[in-house]
Image (cartoon, coloured by chain):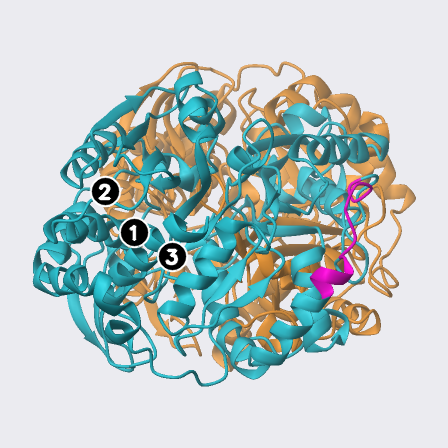
Chain colours: A orange, B cyan
C-alpha cells in the first residue's frame, strides 16, 4: 500500500549521526560474513536485476504464477529447504521454511508483485533495472519494485547467501510467507496465513518482519510499532443504479430536465467530511482508540528529532491541517482516522471540455483506520451513512483493505531491531504507528498475536511512482548502499538469536 | 457544441406524417434542378467523402490552415466568386460571397473543423468516410464530421451545383462565414464577424443559417427559435494556488495532517447547486428571463407532438428532474439555466485504487444561459460566489462560450424555413429555444441583429461520438437521404427569394 513514500518523507530528517563504523561494530564474529558480502556484491546486484526484469503485476494479471515460481526458486537458492506455492482465491502466494536447527525462529513476510509502470514516464526503462549515477545519492538501481519491495527482499536473501558462503549456519530458523497481491490490497494474505501448516509454522516464530529500505536521505531510520488499517473503495454513482439521471452519457443541455449522477456523487461525498476535511461518517470513528500518554511521549521525542522543514519541503506542503504545530501534526498522523479522495473520474476527462451529462461518476477513496476500528465496521458505517442520507444507490465497491496492526515497543522482537540498528550505528526514531498501511494484522491479530514490523538499512524511494530506485552504492557515508543493507540483515538475524 | 445529439433525441419522435411527394410538390419550376441532383448523386457523395478524409481538428492543432484552404476551394467550386481566408487570434476562418444579381441575400454560417475521434471505438475508420448498410436506416456514410457538420454543409453546396447544372441562376445572393474552431467553443467567431467587410456583407442578408440534418428517425423536424448560451470552464483546485494541501500527489496516509485539494473542490462544487441539482450560484440567474406565454404555448404544442417515451428511451432516462411531467420537462429544457458537471478528473483515475492524496483536482463544467443572461456576467457571478465562500483560490478557467441567441418566430427568415419544410412534406415542430448552444449570438446580437438558425432535411447522428453518420440513402420514406437534403436546400433558397 505504498508505505515507502510515506516512510521516506517522514524519515527524511534527523540530527547528524556518527558515521557507522560497521565492520568495527560487528566485531570478529561477523567479519567473515561481511567479507563475503563485499565479494558477492556483483552476484547480489545481478540477482536483484534479474528479479526486476521478471515483473509479476496483480492488477494486470501479469505473470502471477511465474512470479511465485521465481520467488520459490530464489528462496531455495538462498537456503530454504522447503518452498511451496500456495493457491488462493486470487493469485498464488508462497510458503517456505529454512530449518537451521537453531533454538529461535524468525518469520518473514515478502511480496513478489509490483505496481504497474508506464515506461514513458521513466528516465530508464522500469523493467530493465539499470544502475545509474544519481546526483546526491550515488549509484542507484532504477526499476519498478526497486524499493517496493524487491530491493530490500533481495538484499535480505543476500544476507543468507553471505552467511552460508562464510561457512556459518544461520543463527535462527526462518518461516516465510510471500504474496503476489500486495499491490491490490492483499485480498488473500489471510487465506495463505490461515492455512493450518502455515499457522503452525508461524506460531513458532518470535515475530514476522518485512525487509525494508528504512533509511532516509540523512541516514535516519524511523521504526513503527504497527500501522493503520485501510479500506480502499470506489463510490460509483450511476443513472443505472440510481433510477434517476441517464444510463449513459447524454448531451449536457439535458441538465435542465434530467438529474445528474455526477452531482449526486458530489453531494454524497460532501457529507463524508467536515469543513476541515476530517471524517464525518456516522459511527466511523466510534471505536477509534485515542492516542495514549506513552504514544504521545514517543511522538514528542520524534518531533524533537525530525526536521519539520525538510518533511514539509519533501511533500510540497506549507501548512499542516488546521494550522497545527509539528508535534500535533505527528500526533494526528499516528492517531487520526482519515477519509481521503485518491481520485475523481467521471464523464469527460481529456483536455478541454466536452458537453456531456455523464451517466456515471466515480470517486476513489481510502479510509485509514486506527485501533480498535476494523475494516468490516468501517465499510458498514460508510454504507449506512450513505443510505441514511438518500445515497443508498451509490455503489460502495471495496477493492481491498484490512484492519490496523500493532506491536508492543517493549517486545523482544522490536528490541532486537533497535539493537541491530544501533550495532549499525543508527539510533532509530520510534513512532507509535505507521500512518500508511500493510497487512501486518494477519500476524499481529489472534490467533497468531505475533509482533510484526519492517527492518533494514539502505535507502530507496519512488514506490508507485516513476524512477523508483534502490541505492546500490551510497555517496553519503551516513546512508548505506546495498552492501550495508545486507550487513544490517546479518546484524538483525544475530540480534534476534541473542535477544528475542 | 454538440447540438446534434440534443436535436436528434428531441426530434426522434412525432406523429406519422404523409410521405413527402417532393418532386410533385416542387412543381415545374424546380423539376430540372431536382433531376440534376439525382444525376450528380455520386459526385456529391465523393465531394463529402473527400472532405471528411481531410480533417481539420482545432483541439489538436491539426490541419487548421489546410482546412480553411479546402473550404475556400469547395466554395469556389460551388460558385462563390470570392472566398478569402480570415486570420484570427487562433485558427483562421473563411469569408466568401456569391453575387447572383438577386434582390435578396442569404447569410450562411459554416464550420469546417471536426471533433477528435478515436479509431479504436469506430466500426469503420472515422476518416475514411465509408458508406455502409445500417439496419433501420439505409445506406449511411460513417465518419467524423458526417453530421456535425460536413454532411449537411456539403449537401447545401450540392444544391448550388445542381442549380448551376440546371442552367439557373441562384434565386438569392450568398454571404458565408466559416470558422475552424467551432469544436473548441468558437473563441474567435466574433473576431471574424466583426471584420468591417464581413459586417457590411452580413448587414445585407435577411438572416444567417447553418445547414443541418434536422430530421429525426421518424422524419419529424424541430425548428428552434434560438439557443441557450454557454460557458465551458474548468474549476481547478490545487495545493499550489490554495497555499494548503500538497503541491504534488503525496502518500494518502498524510491526509491525517495535510489538507486535500480534492476535498476542497468537492466542497466548492457542493455550493453550486441545490439539493435537486438546480443552480445555486449567487446572482447567476438574476437576469434569466422567465418563459413567456407565447413560449409556453409553443412548448405545449410540441409536447403534444413529441413522443415522451421515445425521447426517454433514446437518452436512457426513466424520470425527469423533480418527477415533472413531459410538458414541464420541455419548459425546463428551453427556459432553465443549468450548471452541469461534464467531467471530474483528479488524482488517480486508472483501474482500481492508488493510495495518494492528490495535489490537484479538476471539475469540468458547462453553464447554460438563457436570455438575458450573458457569458461575461455568468463567469463573474461564479467567481464571486466561490470567493465569498472561501474558494477564491480555485481557478476558474473558461475555455469557451458565448451569449444566448434568439430569433423571432414570425420573422420572414423563419417563415421561409417553415414554408420550405412544408414544401418538402414536413410540418416542423417549433420550439422557443435549443437547449444546446451555438454561436448564433454573433449574428443575432447588435449590431447585426439578424435572424439566425439551422435548416435542412436528411438525418444523421453521433456528433462527438463514435460511428457518427449521415444518411445517404434512406430506407424510411419519411426520412430523406442526401438527395432529399439537397432538394430541401433548393426549396429553401427559392422560399427565401419569395418570402424573406
Q: Is residue B470 above or below residue A132?
A: below
Residue hosting label 3: B463
Q: Nearer the viewer, residue B352 or A132?
A: B352
Disc with the residue nearer the chain's start (2 vs 1): 2
In the picture, measured across the screen, residue A145 lies left or right of residue B412, that is: left
Q: CA distance from mark 3 to mark 1?
A: 7 Å
Q: How many marks?
A: 3
The circle drawn on residue B145 is 1
Q: Is residue B363 above or below residue A390?
A: above
Local crowd size for mark 1, using a 10 Å CA cut-off: few (<14), some (14–19), many (≥20): many
The residue depicted at 37 percent of the width and 36 percent of the height is: B59
- Tell whether label 1 touches label 3 (CB within 8 Å): no
Disc with the residue nearer the chain's start (3 vs 1): 1
The residue depicted at 72 percent of the width and 78 percent of the height is: B325
Q: Is residue B63 magenta?
A: no
Q: Nearer the viewer, residue A83 or B487?
A: B487
Q: Secondary structure at mark 3?
A: loop
Magenta segment's dominant SS is loop
The answer to whether any part of residue A180 appears in the image is no
In the picture, measured across the screen, residue B22 lies left or right of residue A461, that is: left
Amino acid at each position: 500500500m505504498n508505505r515507502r513514500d510515506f516512510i521516506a518523507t517522514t524519515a527524511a530528517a534527523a540530527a547528524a549521526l556518527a558515521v557507522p563504523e560497521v565492520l568495527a561494530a560487528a566485531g570478529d564474529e561477523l567479519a567473515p560474513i561481511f567479507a563475503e558480502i563485499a565479494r558477492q556484491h556483483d552476484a547480489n546486484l545481478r540477482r536483484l536485476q534479474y528479479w526486476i526484469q521478471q515483473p509479476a503485476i496483480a492488477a494486470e494479471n501479469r505473470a502471477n504464477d511465474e512470479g511465485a515460481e521465481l520467488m520459490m526458486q530464489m528462496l531455495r537458492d538462498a537456503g530454504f529447504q522447503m518452498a511451496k506455492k500456495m493457491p488462493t482465491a486470487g493469485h498464488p502466494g508462497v510458503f517456505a521454511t529454512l530449518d537451521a536447527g537453531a533454538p529461535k525462529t524468525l518469520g518473514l513476510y515478502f511480496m513478489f508483485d509490483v505496481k504497474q509502470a508506464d515506461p514513458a514516464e521513466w528516465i530508464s526503462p522500469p523493467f530493465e533495472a539499470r544502475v545509474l549515477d544519481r546526483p546526491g545519492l550515488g549509484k542507484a538501481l532504477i526499476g519498478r519494485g526497486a524499493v517496493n519491495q524487491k530491493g530490500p527482499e533481495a538484499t535480505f536473501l543476500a544476507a543468507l547467501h553471505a552467511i552460508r558462503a562464510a561457512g556459518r549456519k544461520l543463527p535462527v530458523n526462518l518461516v516465510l510467507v510471500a504474496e503476489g497481491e500486495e499491490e491490490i490490497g492483499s485480498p488473500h494474505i489471510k487465506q495463505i496465513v490461515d492455512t493450518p501448516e502455515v499457522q503452525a509454522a508461524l506460531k513458532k516464530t518470535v515475530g514476522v518482519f518485512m525487509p525494508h529500505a528504512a533509511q532516509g536521505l540523512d541516514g535516519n531510520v524511523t521504526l513503527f510499532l504497527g500501522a493503520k488499517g485501510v479500506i480502499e473503495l470506489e463510490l460509483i454513482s450511476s443513472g443505472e443504479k440510481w433510477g434517476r439521471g441517464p444510463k449513459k452519457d447524454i448531451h449536457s443541455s439535458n441538465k435542465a430536465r434530467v438529474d445528474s449522477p455526477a452531482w449526486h456523487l458530489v453531494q454524497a461525498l460532501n457529507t463524508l467530511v467536515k469543513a476541515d476535511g476530517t471524517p464525518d461518517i456516522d459511527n466511523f470513528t466510534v471505536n477509534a482508540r485515542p492516542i495514549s500518554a506513552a504514544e504521545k511521549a514517543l511522538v514528542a521525542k520524534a518531533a524533537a528529532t525530525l526536521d519539520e522543514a525538510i518533511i514539509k519541503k519533501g511533500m510540497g506542503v506549507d501548512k499542516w491541517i488546521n494550522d497545527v504545530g509539528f508535534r500535533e501534526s505527528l500526533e494526528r498522523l499516528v492517531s487520526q482516522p482519515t477519509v481521503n479522495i485518491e481520485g475523481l473520474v467521471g464523464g469527460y476527462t481529456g483536455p478541454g471540455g466536452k458537453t456531456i451529462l455523464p451517466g456515471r461518476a466515480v470517486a476513489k477513496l481510502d479510509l485509514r483506520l486506527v485501533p480498535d476500528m476494523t475494516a468490516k465496521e468501517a465499510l458498514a458505517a460508510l454504507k449506512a451513512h450513505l443510505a441514511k442520507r438518500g445515497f443508498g444507490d451509490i455503489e460502495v465497491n471495496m477493492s481491498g483493505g484490512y484492519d490496523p496492526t500493532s506491536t508492543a515497543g517493549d517486545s523482544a522482537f522490536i528490541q532486537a531491531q533497535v539493537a541491530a540498528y544501533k550495532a549499525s550505528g543508527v539510533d532509530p526514531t520510534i513512532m507509535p504507528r505507521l500512518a500508511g498501511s500493510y497487512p501486518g494484522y494477519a500476524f499481529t491479530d489472534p490467533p497468531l498475536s505475533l509482533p510484526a514490523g519492517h527492518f533494514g538499512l539502505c535507502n530507496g524511494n519512488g514506490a508507485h511512482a516513476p524512477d523508483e530506485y534502490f541505492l546500490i552504492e551510497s555517496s553519503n557515508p551516513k546512508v548505506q548502499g546495498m552492501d550495508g543493507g545486507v550487513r544490517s540483515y546479518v546484524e538483525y538475524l544475530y540480534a534476534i538469536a541473542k535477544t528475542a
